Amino acid sequence: MLDYAALSALAAVVRQGSFERAAAALGVTPSAVSQRVRALEERVGVVLVLRGQPCLPTEAGAQLCAHVERVRLLEGEVAGLLPSLAGAGQDGPMTLRVAVNADSLGTWFMPAAAAYARDTGALLDFVLDAEEHTAGRLRGGEVLAAVTADPEPVQGCRTRPLGALRYVAAASPGGLRAWFPDGPTPGALAAAPVLRFDRRDALQARWAREVAGLDLAAPTHWLPSTRGFVDACLAGLGWGLHPVALVEGHLAAGRLVELAPGHRLDVPLHWQFARIGARALADLTRAVVAAARASLVAP
């Protein structure tokens, strides 16, 4: 049986970033927090916290912190029936850990997060990952909900279709003239510098395959930033795919130009969330679905 006082101390250290702030939040001494965490590490046989400024969880520590958040969700359900238990033993507002792809976070998701936090007083802990991989974060217990491209529900989760995030391939006018004088031909796409978010970003390759039948292998700039993609294209660093919502103004003003007008790429997205803690996650789900309905392309 796990020691939940020790687990709460661990979660507080990770959330607050130090043993001293965790002690203040829990109303105990830093020595007591340290003893509880050390005892838990001895019990499980692994280091759970990397001491530093701030303190960071190890992989095992992150898993235990996720377990604590699930317990808090369940306690929140009970507190709805027994209001006298509300807030008992907690070190602050509830924090929900969610996985979101960077392009969603940079376009439509933030209004949902703000509405949820404003209405509930809860906090959010964002984990950024590609939409093809966020479901894995949910499957591994690292997060409680995720924006994902995977429509198949993770075990113990519900799923809601959100719509599609639409992308457009664009470059600066100078880049278009230099790299694509005859349009996005296979030869031009093979030679033109392309932007990619990271080594798992396959959007540009998927678009090139659909438009030109090409397995894209081009000079690549690696740029892990949604806004940075736009800035890089404006500066003439390379071409890339952007959420339409971010570049509509630049396209209208001629600062960016579509490589192949009419050939846009839709990425269907889904919202998956744990079945536990139905009340807290239902509030977040309503906010996410409303924001998606206002911004995404209908499925």
Image (tube, grey):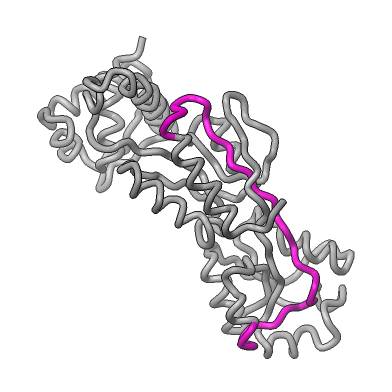
If the image is split into quadrants, where does the N terminus sit?
Answer: top left
Name the one closer to the observer, 77 or 137: 77
Asked whether residue 38 appears in the rendered view, the answer is no
| Of 61 and 298, the residue lying toward us | 298
| Placement of 237 over or under 287, stated as above or below | below
Q: Position of residue 106 (x, y in %)?
A: 51, 61
Residue 179 is left or right of residue 27, and the answer is right
- Range of the magenta residues? 252-280
- Quadrant of residue 264 in the image? bottom right
Residue 201, by quadrant, is bottom right
Q: Residue 157 in magenta?
A: no
Looking at this view, name the residue that lies furthest to the right.
213
| Horizontal side, residue 277 vs residue 152: left or right | left
Residue drawn at 29 percent across, 29 percent down: 10
Vertical placement of residue 130 versus 65, above or below:
below
The reply to whether residue 175 is visible in this rendering is: yes
Q: Quadrant of residue 158?
A: top right
What's the residue at 66%, 51% (across, down)?
163
Which residue shows up at 76% across the image and 84% down it?
A: 179
Residue closer to the observer: 238 or 286:
286
In the rendered image, residue 49, in percent from the top left (x then y), is placed at 32, 34
Looking at the picture, how far across and down is residue 6, in whole percent? 26, 21
Tally of numbered tags: 0
Q: Residue at x 53, y 50 (%)?
A: 290
Q: Position of residue 7 (x, y in %)?
A: 30, 23
**Residue 189 as seen in the image, left or right of residue 248:** right
Q: Is residue 254 above or below residue 118?
A: below
